[in-house]
Image: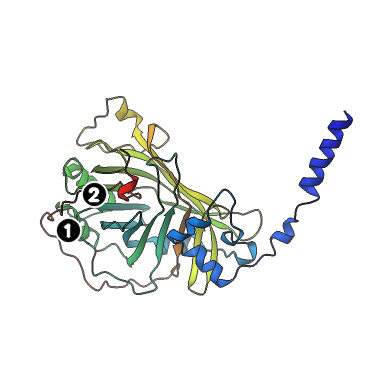
Amino acid sequence: MKNCKLLLTLVVCCAFGLLPSASYAQERTLTDTQLQAITNPKLETCASQSNAIDPASVIPTSNMKEHSPDRVATTMNGIWVGSVVGDSSDVKIDYFWIMDTRNNEALIIALRNGNQSAAGLTLGPNAPKLTYLLCPNEGYIPSVGTPMLHQFVKVANTIDSAPAILEKATGKKLGQGSLSNLWAALVASGYFTSMPAVAFAGGYFKPIQIGAVANPVGPAGVSLQWNAEYRGGGATGIKYTPGVPLVGVEHGAFVGTSTSSGDYLVSSPGNGQIWKVEAGMPCDIAKKGGKEKKSKLSTMKPACIVASKYDLAFNFVTLGPLQPVTLEPMVPTSTPTPVNSPTPTPTPARVSGLYNLSPSSVQQ
């Protein structure tokens, strides 16, 4: 008993007497340069990520700012053009994300075909960016062997050009209407059972949920979550079955901060909750042998999926600079017009699916 008491005393002393106090930790303040590095992650950021969290990557309370969900929704609403860097070379894809936060839905398309369907749209040099950084990690699906960064730049504050951009990218006549109607028309057109590019993918997200998250200490953060339906084919890392959706959920919690470049949200180890994605085949379709009726959309019930085919956690996700809640629509510099089916540019390189488009990440 004496030894046990001694051990207990030593443990208590180490835990409660010898560690820096919480108040001391909260007195840290990062410089603008340090905050810029956090809010604008690069591939090199992965070098500092290890089992130990770098204190310079954790935003202290003194640097936290509260940003309203309404402001986040305003910033997210519109059209975003994506790019991918990583592996031994950049991946050139037709990549865009259309977000309608007024109706709590979004749609994303990615094709490896050499086109740029949203080319010419711009909001200027200080446009908001949505950045996803994924550092090398074994055990994810698809596995990640090298750093990869996906960055979306906002190019329009409205989704007025969405139908034209979608038709130009996919070569399908989709008509007008909400993003849910456009997605349904794209699925019904047979696009995801064809081979429009050497690798292609798309996703539909609803409902987009944006809310405030109370922190034990300091300003409130922001939570983001949406249910997802993914479809694709070709040489992708995510192993799609032609015509069959994967369903899942994406979610995370963010800490707000400010730099000389503007206001930002950050999700990373030590800042909120890391962005997580998990998806698989819907249970109802799996029971039918992986077959889906042509006219039926997935029920998008992420609580019921078979073994995951897409399971990732991102090291950094950042959004900013945030735009004001009252935002005047900006007219794009040009409006894409629908064209006939684009001419794919064949390439032997393999490309993975949505959010993970590096050739080396493909599972053999």
Q: In this view, does 160 lie above or below 105?
A: below
Along the line of sight, the residue nearer the viewer: 276 or 180: 276
Q: Which residue extends farthest left? A: 340
Residue highlighted by disc 1 = 168
Q: Nearer the viewer, mark 1 or mark 2?
A: 2
Q: Which residue is drawn at 84% across and 31% down?
A: 4
- Is mark 1 in CB contact (under 8 Å) with mark 2? no
Reading the chain from its start, which is encountered first: label 1 or label 2? 1
Q: Is residue 86 above or below residue 363?
A: below
Q: For the N terminus, give its image quadrant.
A: top right
Q: Which amino acid does label 2 sit on?
A: Ala
Along the line of sight, the residue nearer the viewer: 184 or 315: 315
Q: Which residue is drawn at 18% across and 45% down?
A: 191
Query: Where residue 110 sits in the image (x, y, percent)?
Result: 27, 52
Q: What residue type is labelled 1?
A: Lys
Left/right placement of residue 132 relative to residue 290 reads right
Residue density around tag 2, few if under 14, some if 14–19, many if 20 or more, within 10 Å: few
Residue highlighted by disc 2 = 349
Query: Where residue 299 sits in the image (x, y, percent)?
Result: 33, 37
Left/right placement of residue 331 relative to residue 135 reads left
Q: Residue at x 30, y 49 (%)?
A: 359
Q: Residue at x 61, y 67 (%)?
A: 30
Query: Where residue 254 sits in the image (x, y, percent)?
Result: 52, 56
Along the line of sight, the residue nearer the viewer: 116 or 211: 116
Indicate the quadrant where residue 323 lies. bottom left
Label 1: element kind: helix
Label 2: element kind: loop
Along the line of sight, the residue nearer the viewer: 83 or 148: 148
Mark 1 to mark 2 CA distance (whole Å): 23 Å
Q: Which mark is residue 331?
A: none
Q: For the C terminus, give its image quadrant.
A: top left
Q: Which residue extends farthest right? A: 2
